Amino acid sequence: MFRLWAKVFENNHLIRDTVIEDPGEDTRTHKVFRALDEVCYRFDLGKPIWLDATIRDFKRHDKTRFTQDNFIETIDFDYLEIHVIEED
């Protein structure tokens, strides 16, 4: 089971979160991208852009933050954080 926890923060406060589960047999990369697509759908967000720093943090910690720099449109929060909390 693959589980990704997504959290939206504003002024250092968690304002919404969700957990996406993927029991499929696909690659980890595909699971992460599908989960992020689902998060953006649930939170009504445009898809963020993976910058070099974002990729580096995710590879190192299984967790990263998407700030205004990662989005084309203006966001009404400080950042979206994703964190892989379970992998098979």
Image (tube, helix red, strand yellow):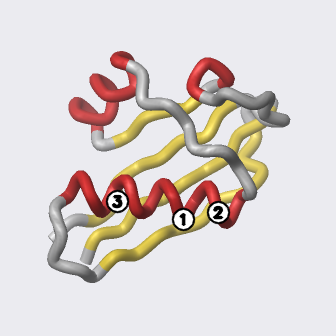
Horizontal side of residue 66 vs 56, given as left or right: right
Q: Disc 2 marks which amino acid? A: Tyr
Pointer 1: residues within 10 angstroms few (<14), some, or many (20+)?
Answer: some
Q: Secondary structure at mark 3?
A: strand
Amino acid on which the number 1 mark rests in the picture: Glu
- Residue depicted at 23% across the width and 30% down the height: 60
Side (left or right) of 59 relative to 8: left
Identify the residue at horizontal 65%, vertical 33% (top origin): 79
The N terminus: image quadrant: bottom left
Residue 25 image label: none
- Return the mark for residue 41: 2
Q: Percent from the top left, x then y, of residue 86?
A: 28, 65
Label 1 vs 3, first from the N-terminus: 1
Residue 85, labelled with which disc? 3
| Residue located farthest toward the bottom when viewing the structure as drawn | 23
Q: Residues within 10 Å of mark 3 (few under 14, many from 20)?
A: few
Numbered disc 1: secondary structure: helix
Measured Cα–Cα span from mark 3 to mark 2: 20 Å
Q: Quadrant of the C terminus?
A: bottom left
Amino acid type at image mark 3: Ile
Q: CA distance from mark 2 to mark 1?
A: 5 Å
75 lies above or below 46: above
Residue 50, horizontal then vertical, whole percent: 42, 30
Decide: marks 2, 1 in contact (CB < 8 A)? yes
Q: Quadrant of residue 71?
A: top right
- Sequence-earlier tag: 3 or 2: 2
| Viewer-closest of 30 and 79 | 30
Q: Residue at x 62, y 55 (%)?
A: 40
Residue 41 to residue 63: above or below: below
Tell me what residue is drawn at x 34 percent, y 55 percent: 32
